[in-house]
Amino acid sequence: MSHLVVDHLTKVYERGKVRALHDVSFSVERGAFLVLIGLSGSGKSTLLRCINRLVEPTSGRVFLNGLELTKLSPRAMRKVRRRIGMVFQQFNLVKRATVLQNVLAGRLGYNPTLPTLLGRFPKKDLQRAQECLERVGLLDKMYVRADQLSGGQQQRVGIARALMQEPELLLADEPVSALDPATSHSVMQYIEQINKEDGVTVIASLHFLSLARRYGQRIIALRAGEIVFDGLPEAIDDQKFKEIYGEEAEEVEVR
């Protein structure tokens, strides 16, 4: 059984005027590293958010381990979402909170609401938070406010927060688009490490094809909400590139 199955997914916005996704179907095996590529507005972010139902699909189905997510009640979906980590383009940190507080937010779905609102977490969660920060090289920044960190450091806090959930699936929505090339590779290598060492299935949307080729075991390309390529990175030749990005596009390498 595939780990994740997306079945004829469609998403229409603005009273039927904007079709963000059209009849998208694919499956992902456990432990895979899948990269989504395509122009801005091609549907990459919408697809990721439909998978964990931060955006509700208009039609179609999503299955995780055989469980149909698109049928679940909001309460049941919140429980499933505990095991689906998310890394956001703009980091989504509480800027005035410390690095440690931001990472502990990854356990909010597992603990009673009142103690967590008061900042009280079990000892094992505090220990795990430190372990997650150590994995992304930020243990020494534990008590620093998030807004005092660089962009790359903030995204690493976002990765540590996702790790706190003990995810089986990690969705990364343009995780390095706000970062310079060298920092982009640093952040992607942490995501790759989680995939390889923890066996976490990763679906990441990336802007640059060079990054997609370096980190993706498989690439799905979207154009105007439809899949126009699904295969190995090395299969994207000049002709495929033009089909994905348009005839006027030129490939820019980011090393």
Image (tube, rainbow, N blue to C red):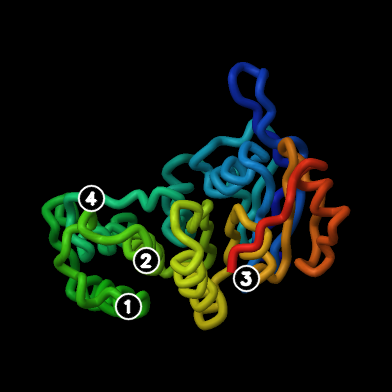
| Measured Cα–Cα span from mark 1 to mark 4 | 19 Å
Residue for badge 4: 95
Q: Measure how far apart labels 1 and 2 are at the Cα level.
A: 8 Å
At a point 46% along the width and 54% down the height, the residue shown is: 81
Up/down of 210 relative to 92, above or below = below
Residue that badge 3 annotates: 215
Residue at 54% from the left image edge and 44% from the top image edge: 49
Q: Residues within 10 Å of mark 3 (few under 14, many from 20)?
A: many
Location of mark 2 (residue):
156
Amino acid type at mark 1:
Gly
- Whole-angstrom CA distance, mark 1 to mark 3, is 20 Å
Query: Who is closer to the viewer here, 70 or 211?
Result: 211
* Quarter of the image where the N terminus is located: bottom right
Residue 69 location, x and y as percent? 58, 48
Q: Is residue 113 visible?
A: yes
Of 100 and 53, nearer the camera is: 100
The numbered dot on residue 137 is 1
**Disc 3 secondary structure class:** helix
Q: Is residue 182 left or right of residue 64?
A: left
Identify which amino acid the numbered label 3 is placed on: Tyr
As measured in the structure, the alpha-carbon distance from the residue carrying label 2 to the one carrying label 4 is 14 Å
Q: Earlier in the sequence, mark 4 or mark 3?
A: 4
For the residues bearing labels 1 and 2, Cβ distance under 8 angstroms = yes
As shown in the figure, which amino acid type bears the numbered disc 4? Lys
Where does the image place residue 122, in percent across and percent down from the top left?
A: 19, 69
